[in-house]
């Protein structure tokens, strides 16, 4: 996937509309289901979102961008 395709897929998720953080129940929190997302643009702008046992409605769509298939994972540093 090219960087342009990647950026387009991120835009389609409307991450700017996500809440700053998502909080689940205490039962889920104790199981360690936590996530963080930091996007840093070339102009220095940053978008940070996180969750503790809860997720935005289209979180699985975000994960599908990173997972090319069951064996390959796209890591971006």
Image (tube, rainbow, N blue to C red):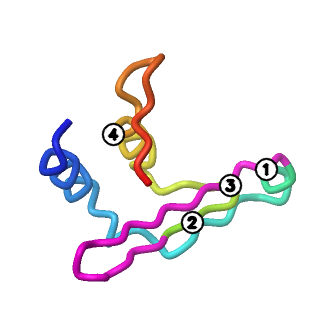
Mark 1: secondary structure: loop
Q: Position of residue 77 (x, y in %)?
A: 44, 54
**Residue identifier under label 3:** 34
**Residue identifier under label 2:** 50
**Marks 4 and 3, how far apart at CA:** 19 Å
Mark 2: secondary structure: strand
Q: Which residues are magenta?
A: 31-48
**Marks 2 and 3, how far apart at CA:** 8 Å
The tag earlier along the polypeptide, 1 or 2, is 1
The tag earlier along the polypeptide, 4 or 3, is 3
Q: Which image quarter holds the N terminus?
A: top left
**Marks 1 and 2, how far apart at CA:** 13 Å
**Residue identifier under label 4:** 65
Identify which residue is drawn at 23% across, 81% down. Answer: 43
**Residue identifier under label 1:** 32
Identify which residue is drawn at 16% across, 41% down. Answer: 2
**Marks 1 and 4, how far apart at CA:** 23 Å
Residue at the bottom extreme, as displayed = 44
Identify which residue is drawn at 71% across, 49% down. Answer: 33
Q: Is residue 3 left or right of residue 28?
A: left
| Vertical comparison of 75 with 18: above or below | above
Pointer 3: residues within 10 angstroms few (<14), some, or many (20+)? some
Identify which residue is drawn at 61% across, 62% down. Answer: 51
Nearest the camera: 62 or 55? Answer: 62
Name the quadrant containing residue 26: bottom right
Is disc 1 in contact with disc 3, using a CB cutoff of under 8 Å?
yes
Is disc 2 in contact with disc 3, using a CB cutoff of under 8 Å?
yes
């Amino acid at each position: 996937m090219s960087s342009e395709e990647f950026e387009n897929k991120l835009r389609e998720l409307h991450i700017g509309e996500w809440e700053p953080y998502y909080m689940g129940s205490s039962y889920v929190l104790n199981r360690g289901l936590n996530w963080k997302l930091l996007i840093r643009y070339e102009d220095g702008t940053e978008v940070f979102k996180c969750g503790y046992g809860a997720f935005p409605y289209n979180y699985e769509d975000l994960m599908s961008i990173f997972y090319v298939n069951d064996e390959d994972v796209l890591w971006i540093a």
